[in-house]
Every structure is written in structure tokens, then in C-alpha cells.
Amino acid sequence: MEPSNNKQAILEDVGSMIRQVIGEEWIQNTPITMDTTFSEDLELESIEIVALAEQVQTRFGDEVDFPGWFGTLDVDAIIGLTVGQLVDRIAERTSATGVA
């Protein structure tokens, strides 16, 4: 599978997880792209980030280490974090294991 196709599949998985975590009607028809921001576009709260991190770990494994990676980000990076950055992280960390 080519990296761009792999990232598209990961984006679809992550988008489904985000919709499930938010669980509100407005998100069901909202496009989630690589440029979608967690803070501004999705308005995810910290508890929702934790729930998403759990789903990412369950789906993609411990190699992604979402909580550890998230903890290395400064406040500005967290505020500007995009879905694409998470997709890139997952693709990078799982490429060697074939999990994605």
C-alpha cells in the first residue's frame, strides 16, 4: 500500500474515532481533513482527547504513544494541532510494524 493511500485510510479511521468521541449530531456531516484542528475546528475538550488517545492506542498499538507524544508538545503546538499531524504520527510509527 502506498503511503498516501495508507494516510487516507488512517485519516478515515481517525475521523470515525473523532465522530464517536464527540458523539454529537453536528460532527456526523462535518468533513474531517488533514487540516482540521482539534482545538478550533473540533473544539475537543481534554476528556475527549483522552478518549481519542485510548481509541488510537487500541486501534494502532502502543507504538504510536499518543499520550507521550502529546506531552512533548508546547501549548501553542497543542492549540494548533491538526488531524493531519496525528495521522502523520500514526503513519510514521506504524509503518515498520504494518499495524495501520
Image: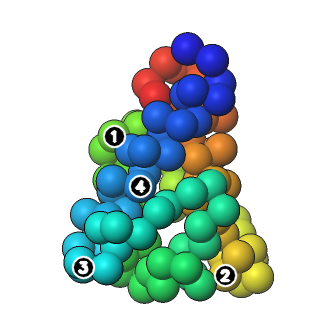
Q: Disc 3 marks which residue? A: 24
Instruction: Indicate the position of residue 38 as horizontal and vertical percent values.
Output: 54, 74
Which of pointers 2 and 3 lies earlier in the amino acid sequence?
Answer: 3
- Per the rendering, the mark at residue 83 is none
Which amino acid type is shown beneath numbered disc 3? Answer: Glu
How would you rate the neighbour count of disc 1 (Cα within 10 Å): few for under 14, some for 14-19, many for 20 or more?
some
C-alpha span from label 2 to label 1: 24 Å
Which amino acid type is shown beneath numbered disc 4? Answer: Gly
Q: Disc 4 marks which residue? A: 15
Q: Secondary structure at mark 4?
A: helix
Instruction: Indicate the position of residue 94 as horizontal and vertical percent values.
Output: 55, 29
Which amino acid type is shown beneath numbered disc 1? Answer: Arg
* Of residues 56 and 7, the one drawn nearer to the viewer in this rendering: 7
In the depicted structure, whether residue 94 falls above or below residue 34: above
Q: Disc 1 marks which residue? A: 59
Q: Nearer the viewer, mark 2 or mark 3?
A: 3
At 48% across and 85% down in the image, what residue appears?
43
Which of pointers 1 and 4 lies earlier in the amino acid sequence?
Answer: 4
- Badge 2 vs badge 3, beta-carbon distance below 8 Å: no
Instruction: Indicate the position of residue 46 as horizontal and vertical percent values.
Output: 43, 82
